[in-house]
Amino acid sequence: MHPPLVAPEAEGVTPEQRRELQERRLRQLVDRLLAAGGLQAGRLRESGVSAGSDVRLEDLHRLPLVSKQDFWDHYPFGLRAAAEDDIVCVHGTSGTMGRPTLVPYTAHDIEVWTQVMARALGGAGVTRRSVVHCAYGYGLFTGGLGVHHGATRLGATVLPVSSGATDRQLRLLLDLRPDVLCCTPSYATYLGEALASTGITADQLSLRVGLFGAEPWTEEMRQSIEGLLGLRALNIYGLTEVIGPGVACESLDSGGLLNIAEDHFFPEVVGPDDEPLPDGEVGELVFTTLTKSGTPLLRYRTGDVASLSGPAPGSPRTLRRMSRVLGRTDDMVVIRGVNVFPSEIEAVLLADRRVAPHYLIVEDRRDRSRPELRVAVEPRDPNGDTELLARELAAALLGRLDISCIVRVLDHVPRVATGKAQRLVRWEHGVSPLPGIE
Ligand code: DLL
């Protein structure tokens, strides 16, 4: 089933037509950056570019990169390229390291964001008849308002519930019968379990589809959420620096990969030496914001690890696609020489039906000469054989990751009711981050 395109002139053109548009937009972007002066203009000039006409799409990989560190070094608004009077709002993220990254938007940027979010929702089958329960946080975080902009553009009814107050969320899910749910995958799990604990089953709800993102999740988590809530769970990706949610999103017909809004956000994947990687190879995602004006970015390195692919065969959507985010370049844990992504651990844990979808990974570096990975899980059945479960999970982790982990089965692993789930903590000294994990 192919949900209709919201913007056929953008989503459905031939790759050649799109490439022409991308190149034209890239040249305009370079001219905008050069005219604005500042950090990116300086780097462009240093690399020998003095006008947009110097640049071709196929040479993009030779141009300088920009990173989160550049946002921090030029805090708060050093990467702004538009006049102050043209800024209409600011969004931000606490980021993975707890430091804020602030991004000023122009009215034009909000329009781009609204369009790409309308496309993302449309690909999930959302129409003007839909009721969208939006439980992403509203505020500096882009989740709530991003979904809101896109859903209103489609003419759907939005319930701007924001995050938290779970009892009220359940009430609204039952009384207002939304067919679309948007929130983080960890909050979807939390909502699903809260429902189950009140004796309500998924078939008493009217949910049909959910757009879940803002944090890493796995195929196993998808199955768990689909079972808990009785809907089709799709993955939506984005980041504040680039625009917010809507940079890429699965559609009902995208074959498990995420369609990239590549007419606005040109994707690349680079390897450890920043060399460009071909489709299918896993590396760091880099985006160029072809049309943004408030904080345009040439080759922004996201820190997110994924691979690129061509368009979904047989789909009217001709956009290139990306895999789900497999990890971050900066949350990759290197334990005794082995690179481990938390998502791989999640896949092993949630593949075991005895494990509830709540866990915490502790990177224990108290003894620097012998770092350990400790994994706390919660059993679905508190009366099951927890020792056997711990042993079997440790064996499965060893089989998949090639390193030994210490698995602890605990009565309760803390849940996330607001914000993004933090599933990896580092323990270098002091008290244990979770009693029972020692
Ligand atoms: O999380 C934007 C967003 C809101 C995306 C709602 C999807 C839904 P930031 O707060 O700036 O923006 O965080 C961006 O979150 O670099 C990824 O590391 C991570 N992330 C976002 N979506 C996904 C996803 C929003 N679907 C950072 N899978 C990104 C894995 C994701 N990680």
Image: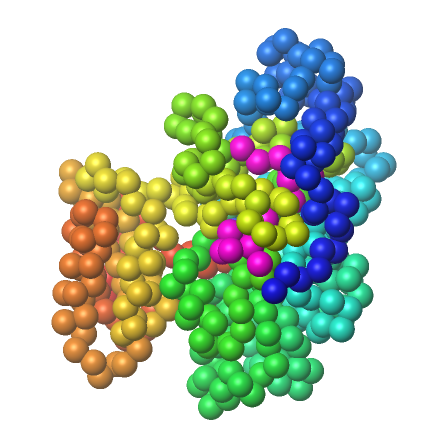
Residue at the right extreme of this rendering: 85
Measured from the top left, where is residue 276 in percent x and y?
Answer: 48, 26
Q: Which residues are magenta?
A: 253-268
Depth check: give the residue in front, 79 or 123: 123
The image quadrant that residue 66 belongs to is top right
- Residue at horizontal 38 percent and vertical 43 percent from the top: 331
Measured from the top left, where is residue 256 in percent x and y?
Answer: 49, 56
Measured from the top left, where is residue 68 in percent x and y?
Answer: 54, 34
- Residue at horizontal 14 percent and vertical 65 percent from the top: 391
Q: Is residue 375 left or right of residue 150?
A: left
Measured from the top left, where is residue 385 in percent x and y?
Answer: 16, 78
Vertically, is 432 above or below 264?
A: below
Depth check: give the residue in front, 240 or 156: 156
Q: Is residue 403 left or right of residue 46?
A: left
The image quadrant that residue 177 belongs to is bottom right
- Residue 52 is covered by the magenta coloring: no
Quarter of the N terminus within the rendering: bottom right
